[in-house]
Structure formats: C-alpha cells, structure tokens
Amino acid sequence: MQKCNKYLNSGYWQFGYKPNLGTETAVFALKSVIYHYRHNNSSVFGCFLYASKAFDNALHSKLARKLIDNGMPIFYLKMLYFWWKEQEFQVKWGDSSSIKYKVQNSVRQGGILSPLLFNVYMDELGKKLNDSRIGCQIGRAMCNNYWYADDICLLAPSIRSLQYLTELCQRYAKNHNIVFNTSKTVCMKFAVKKDTWGHKDVMIDNVKLEWCDNFPYLGYTIQNSQKHCDEMEMEKRVNSLKTIGTVLLTRFGNTSREVKKLLFNTYAGVIYCAALWVPSTKSGCKAKVAYNTALRRLFCVRGEHSISKLFVELRINNFTALRRFASFSLKSRVLCNDNEIIISIRNCDSFYESDIFHSWNELLYGDSIT
C-alpha cells in the first residue's frame, strides 16, 4: 500500500482517508461555507447525492486507465488487474456455500486499497465540478463539492447553478456505471432571513428531487435553520448517551470499578463531532445531564452525592472537559491544515465571527455555557 499510495492521490474536495482530514473536517468545511454565504446575506442551495452501490459498480477498465494517467507503473497495475479479475467469491449460509463466482466490476468494500481506488475513480468528477467555476466559492478556492469516499454534497448560491452541477454529475455517472438513487438524493436550502423564493425543482435524470429541512450528512444532522442549528444533532447524542448508560449498567453492572471506568471512557468519553456543536443553554444542559446520569447509573451514585467528586476520583473528564478536548483537537487541525477549502475558510473574516469559532474560544479560554 505504501508503494502505491503516491499514485492514488485525489483533489482537495475529497476528505476521505487523508492525514488531518476526515468526516469531522468535512462537516466543518460544509457548515463554514454555508455560514460564510449567510453571513454575507446570500442563500445557499445544497444537494446530497446518494450513489447506489457505488463501490460495486466501478469499472475496472476505466479505473485502470485513471491509474495509468496518475503514473502508476505497469507492474503494479498488472498486479491489481490480476487481483480484480481472478478473485473469486462465495456466499455462505449456515453450513451451506454457493458455487464460486468471479466479479467483473467493483472495488470491494472492506479492502485496504478499495476506498483509495474509488477516490481515484471518482476524482475526475470532482475536478470537472471544480473547473466549472460554478457554485460556491471563497477567495480563489471553489467550494462547490465535498466528498468523503462515495458521500457527495454539492453547494451553489442559486438553484440554476445547482442544477448545472447535478447535470454534470449525472453525465459523469452514466459514463462510469454509477447510479444516483433519486429517492434518497435530496436538496436543502439554507436561506437568509429576508429571502423569499418560489419553489423550483432540481432534476436528476428527469426526476424531481425532494427538498428537506435536515439531512444526516456523514452521521451529523445538517439543519437549514439559522439559530440553534445543532439542536437535532445534540438531541440524537443525548439519546445515545442515555442508551449507552442503560446498556453498560445492564451488561456490566457487576464488573470491577476499573472495567466500568474503561467502558465508560470507551463508549461515552468520545462524542462524535462534539467540537461542531453550538448549543443553546437548554440543549447544552440536557447533554451534560445525560452524560452525568450515565456515569451515576453505572457507578451506582445517587443524585444527592457530588458528581464532581466522582469525576475527580475516577479521573474521568467531565462533560465540559470532553468538549474542550474535542474543540482543541479540531481547532488545531483547522489552523494547520493545507486543504484548500479549509485554508480559504481560515482566511476569511466570517470564520472568526462564526458561532463555532466563538464556541471554541469560550470553551478553551473562558467559561462554558454548559
């Protein structure tokens, strides 16, 4: 993999499987660009594309051509091509197994190289979208398409430009055996306060796409509301903490104190994308209470006893410290990142005036609302 890695590069629009990038930075970039446009009194239109079985539909011949264009030596390419064409599969059900069969397409999911190969396979589409110079832009960087493997989001300041981007995606998909599921592909409008708009349709393959008010992008709920836009995401995490507390108590209530501590840190000590939260006082308190209650239940500590003392005794981070560590980690990655979209966000005034940036400073240098 190390020898092949330099031939598997993809553009800055791809956030998947790269150093200092990931789902959290992808969601941060998306939210920051939306905030930048709203901050400058411009609405934004987004489209979340769902590609059905995208990994399974990759054509080996087209992928091989793209790897040649990336400069991969023919020796490595022949080895990969032999692997693609000669690998055999079986379906096992209980004690029975199917006959062996070969797969003519796909970069199989679960393989070490598979996501990187798929990035190469779809990278030309990202370049076409970028070179179109249509859609959202900050400074010189185009911010009109965001990728994490096969999860794609398009952003544009108008419906007409969004329609152009979706048509570009559809043409590329037809030439590369990719099918966008129109029943799962949705659009969303991030409006400014005084914006009024007549409902217009965005089409893919002559099918009207649905408009929605929220969407779980990379596991994080994106909302189109202007204030407290993380409420649904935080509610989801509150319910998750409640479930974690119940499951840990039910299954591991009789284990030792050290085992309980390890389990709590593993399952509740890291909350996905907590650094992106800009909570209201109410939702922040609810999340804190859910976290504290999970710890109390696991260690059988009653409500009248101090939870702060328990955190100190167990050397477990309290909820504010947990968010502080998460915020410091993401802020550090953002401020030293060489991704062009992140750099463009970092260099604009709206980032330093954003709710996320103020939330980070409040957690790291001042008193937290939670």
Image: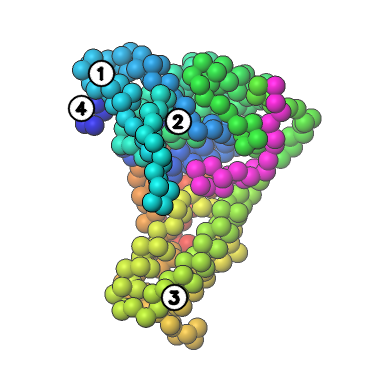
How far apart are the two marked residues, 3 and 2, measured between alpha carbons?
40 Å
CB under 8 Å between discs 4 and 3: no
Question: Hey, which quadrant is residue 308 in on the image?
Answer: bottom left
Instruction: Pinpoint residue 45: horizontal percent, then vertical percent.
Output: 64, 31
Residue type, mark 2 in image: Asp
> Label 4 vs label 2: CA separation?
25 Å
Q: Earlier in the sequence, mark 4 or mark 2?
A: 4
Closest to the camera, between mark 1 and mark 4, is 1
Residue carrying label 3: 249
Please say if 321 is above or below 299.
above
Q: Earlier in the sequence, mark 3 or mark 2?
A: 2
Residue designated by label 1: 78
Residue 115: mark: none
Question: Between residues 323 and 221, which one lies in front from this camera angle?
Answer: 221
Answer whether residue 216 is magenta in the image: yes
Name the quarter where the N terminus is drawn.
top left
User: Pointers 4 and 2 in contact (CB under 8 A)?
Assistant: no
Q: What's drawn in magenta, residue-wise?
A: 206-224
Return the disc, 3 or 1, that comes first in the chain's sequence. Answer: 1
Question: Mark on residue 3?
Answer: 4
